[in-house]
Image: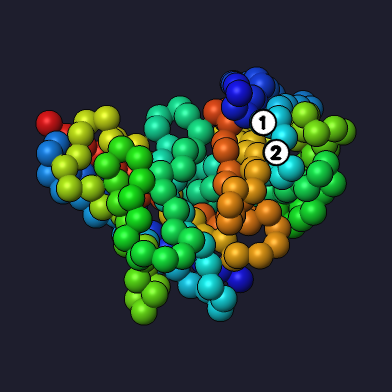
Amino acid sequence: AQSVTQLDSQVPVFEEAPVELRCNYSSSVSVYLFWYVQYPNQGLQLLLKYLSGSTLVKGINGFEAEFNKSQTSFHLRKPSVHISDTAEYFCAVTPPAGGGNKLTFGTGTQLKVEL
Amino acid sequence: DAGVIQSPRHEVTEMGQEVTLRCKPISGHDYLFWYRQTMMRGLELLIYFNNNVPIDDSGMPEDRFSAKMPNASFSTLKIQPSEPRDSAVYFCASSLKGLVVYEQYFGPGTRLTVT
């Protein structure tokens, strides 16, 4: 079984400042890793994913994440945030095989960008 | 494509009433997932289907909940009788395998309020 821990439930940040949202996972097998974003009153959208290869992955809206196998982490970063990045961010994992890649989600991190 | 379609977007009902939530997945997707999102428990997977067949319903809270997928383009989640603790946002997602992994696409959700 897999589990995902998002250590910060809320992260306030000023516009144009950098941000890092933390995600740690636990699994007895290798996993694929995802970050999803949920804007207010909307469903979840895929931001980026790590499957294999380069440990630094780039996603939409200027976000990137780095996979660290030794620390079992997949932290999300953006060098300069915008007001429009205010949303809830979910980290998720799935084992490579079976179940249509059923996702296990973290509890989410609310990013609030302030002027 | 129109994306995953859910109806209704909002539902307010009284305790004891039957509630039916509907989902139309993206055409061609072979997996369909039902999730529930609450402040207390976050995002929980309730049940998922593969090619219209239920694969794992271990997340369904109790017998009051049932889900069906009579064909590839329609699924329902029914709660009978409803209780105030069922108040939540219910998401439907569908997925299709890309080069390596299935990617889930979420609908906008149905916000259920049981009074």
**Residue identified by numbered label 1:** B26
Q: Quadrant of the C terminus of chain A?
A: top left
- Frontmost residue, B18 versus A54: A54
Any mark on residue B62, and which?
none
Q: Quadrant of the N terminus of chain A?
A: bottom right
Give SS at disc 1. Answer: loop
Note whether A32 is above or below A108 in the view shown: below
Residue B40 visible within the image: yes
- Which residue shows up at 80% across the image and 39% down it? B67
Direction from residue A111 to residue B41 in the image, left or right: right
Give SS at disc 2. Answer: loop
Chain containing mark 2: B
Direction from residue B87 to residue A91 in the image, left or right: left
Three-letter code for the amino acid on which mark 2 is drawn: His
Q: Residue furthest right?
A: B70
Chain containing mark 1: B
The answer to the question of whether label 2 and label 1 lie on touching residues, with beta carbons closer than 8 A, is yes
- Image location (x, y in percent) of residue A37: 41, 41
- Frontmost residue, B5 versus B80: B5
Label 1 Cα crowd, 10 Å radius (few <14 / some 14-19 / many 20+): many
- Which residue shows up at 72% across the image and 48% down it? B47
Label 2 Cα crowd, 10 Å radius (few <14 / some 14-19 / many 20+): many
Three-letter code for the amino acid on which mark 1 is drawn: Ile
- Image location (x, y in percent) of residue B48: 73, 48
Note whether A60 is above or below A64 in the view shown: above
**Residue identified by numbered label 2:** B29
Separation of disc 2 and disc 1 at Cα? 6 Å
On the image, which quarter does residue B72 sit in?
A: top right
Residue B110 visible within the image: no
Direction from residue A45 to residue A68 in the image, left or right: left
- Image location (x, y in percent) of residue A7: 34, 61
